[in-house]
């Protein structure tokens, strides 16, 4: 029996530029270009503390975020994680979320992925 290896296309960021205190411009390797708002980026943090998680049939539901926390929307640093994600450090000390390329694309402000926002 022959085994076939299926190639799966994965999105990749070609260029990420902070164009203002509130927004990034992202150019993707498939040619798409779109803005990502920092407030949206922070509010859709994918970490377990922000989004929740289920482990061994136990579910953690985080309390509602305090959107008035000082520094919540102030971006301090950005770091690439391997070949699949970005990590953002925020002014309120939060830095746990790993934003995969797919998750970042779902947050695109041009509306191309609006039906998938938060996926």
Image (spheres, rainbow, N blue to C red):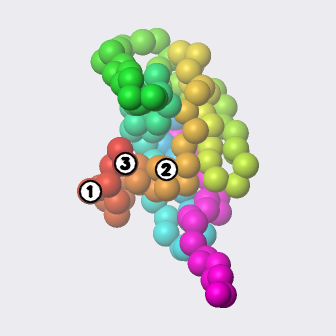
- How packed mark 3 is, by other alpha carbons closer than 10 Å (few <14, some 14-19, many 20 or more), is few
First in sequence: mark 2 or mark 3? 2
Residue at 70%, 55% in the rendered image? 83
> Are the two marked residues, 2 and 1, in contact with CB atoms closer than 8 angstroms?
no
The answer for how far apart the CA atoms under marks 2 and 3 are is 10 Å
Q: Which label was assigned to residue 119?
A: 3
Q: Locate residue 109, reporting x and y percent.
A: 37, 52
- How packed mark 2 is, by other alpha carbons closer than 10 Å (few <14, some 14-19, many 20 or more), is many
**Left or right side of 45 for 64:** left
Q: Locate residue 20, reporting x and y percent.
A: 52, 40
Within the image, what quadrant is residue 29 found in? bottom right
Q: Residue furthest front?
A: 1
Residue 14 is a magenta residue: yes
**Of residues 119 and 4, which is closer to you in this image?**
4
Task: Give the magenta part as a residue range.
Answer: 1-20
> Are the two marked residues, 3 and 1, in contact with CB atoms closer than 8 angstroms?
no
The answer for how far apart the CA atoms under marks 3 and 1 are is 9 Å
**Left or right side of 50 for 7:** right
Residue 7 is a magenta residue: yes
Secondary structure under badge 2? helix
Identify whether 107 is placed above or below 72.
below
Q: Locate residue 97, reporting x and y percent.
A: 55, 33
Identify the image quadrant of the N terminus. bottom right
The label nearer to you, 3 versus 1, is 3
Q: Which label was assigned to residue 115?
A: 1
**Left or right side of 87 for 26:** left
Question: What residue did someone put label 2 on?
Answer: 104
Identify whether 35 is placed above or below 66.
below
Identify whether 50 is placed above or below 111.
above
């Amino acid at each position: 029996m022959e085994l076939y290896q299926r190639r799966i296309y994965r999105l990749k960021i070609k260029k990420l530029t902070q164009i203002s205190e509130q927004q990034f411009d992202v150019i993707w390797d498939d040619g798409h270009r779109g803005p990502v708002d920092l407030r949206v980026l922070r509010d859709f943090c994918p970490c377990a503390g922000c989004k929740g998680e289920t482990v061994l049939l136990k579910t953690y539901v985080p309390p509602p975020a305090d959107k008035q926390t000082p520094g919540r929307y102030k971006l301090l640093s950005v770091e690439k994680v391997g070949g699949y994600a970005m990590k953002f450090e925020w002014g309120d000390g939060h830095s746990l979320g790993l934003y995969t390329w797919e998750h970042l694309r779902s947050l695109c402000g041009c509306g191309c992925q609006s039906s998938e926002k938060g996926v």
